[in-house]
Image: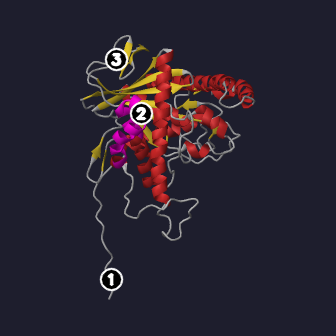
Amino acid sequence: MITLNHTYRIYPHTTEEQTLIQWMEICRGAYNYALREIKDWCGSRKCAIDKCSLEKEYILSPELKFPGEIYQLNKLPKAKKEFSLLSSVPSQVLQQTIKQLHRAWEYFQNRGFGFPRFKKYGQLKSLLFPQFKESPVTNLHIKLPKIGAIPINLHRPIPKGFVVKQVRILRKADKWYASISLQCNVNIADPIPHGHPIGVDVGLSVFLATSDGVIVDPPKFFKSLQGKLKLLQRRLSRKKKRSKNYEKQRIKVARLHHKIDNTRKDFHFKVAHALCDFGDMVFMEDLDYRTSAKGMFGKHMLDAGFGQFRTIVKYVCWKRGKFFGEVDARGTSQECPQCGGEVRKDLSVRVHSCPHCGYTTDRDVAAGQNIRNRGIKLISTVGQTGSQTACAVDLPGTGENQSRQVAKSCKRTTRKSSK
């Protein structure tokens, strides 16, 4: 089973746009009400019934069960009779809002932190339509329940054999999008290692450097527009909240953020396709970029978007039949790719010069070559005892020691106790 998500721009009229915004606010109210029930139930179980605070906590019956997903979904028909606004929203869209809350609750239960929060005005910016009797997408329109046909820019056709499973309507700044989930009942195996390997090292001085010597400069989308964003945000802070002028200025700020996000993502996709054009195997470092984003260079790390870039490269490699792998990142810049010797150097040293073998190259290129070598070793090592792998045979850049290997079962003998 293959699932793809295609995002298209839609153009609702003023009446349709107001209807979608009203539905989002109604769903936000239902989300907050359901979360209030969960918080009250949890608050009434924090202490003994004779010690609860009458000002902060409700005293609920100890026999009252937890307001789970099924319980709250079954209460929706009764709530629609009391609150007529709930009936204006499609029933399945309202149900998906309650399900979204309980997915967040289950996520909190598994992790132990991240309790769901109440959504403020304007924070719920999507509606999910989970089911359709027939395909709602044509060449010019997308048909939604209780609204009708909305013009859509179908810039790429839906692939043959794929069925529309669900549609999520998104609002970004003052623009509207339809994220369509497509499914096809086929199974495709993951790409196997083959062809020319490439190691990719990412950084702040250069966006990336490959093992083949290709260096891409950092575009710095946020930094280039930071001055304009600062001016717009200063004007926004001086407006009265919820006024018309405040809303106009807020949309200007949101447009600029949306432009930065789109240009960054477009750049990532173009670089990912270029990497797939140069090689058949792409290796990157297995790093948690969230930790680096909290340091002194956090703004520059978030501007580069290395986590998003790695996810996009992985997706593009799968789509184009290229192999993608992640390797250990420890010491990639402190090791010589030619002889394997340790070459210690500070961040200020941008040239790799090995005192053992005399190999000299750019520091980031050397790190990319180390990533490539580790990736080749990763796919050519033996997994389990008795298995045989021949993944790295005849690969460019591999030596004699990366040929076929056969693991032998090791026979361990225990030391006899001396009497």
Q: Amino acid at mark 3?
A: Val
Q: Would residue 52 be seen by someone viewing this image from the given angle?
A: yes
Q: Is residue 314 left or right of residue 114?
A: left
Residue of label 2: 84
Q: Nearer the viewer's eye, disc 3 or disc 2?
A: 2
In the image shown, does 80 or 126 lie closer to the viewer? 80
Task: Determine the CA span between mark 3 and mark 2.
Answer: 30 Å
Residue 325 image position (x, y, % from top left): 42, 38
The one of 304 and 122 positioned closer to us in this rendering: 122
Mark before the other along the chain sequence, 3 or 1: 3
Q: Residue 330's spot in the image, x, y percent? A: 54, 48
Q: Which amino acid type corresponds to the residue marked 1 in the rendered image?
A: Ser
Tell me: 382 left or right of 397: left
User: In this picture, which residue range is highlighted in magenta?
Assistant: 71-97
How busy is the neighbourhood of tag 1: few (under 14 within 10 Å), some, or many (20 plus)? few
Q: Using the rendered view, name the quadrant where residue 73 is placed.
A: top left
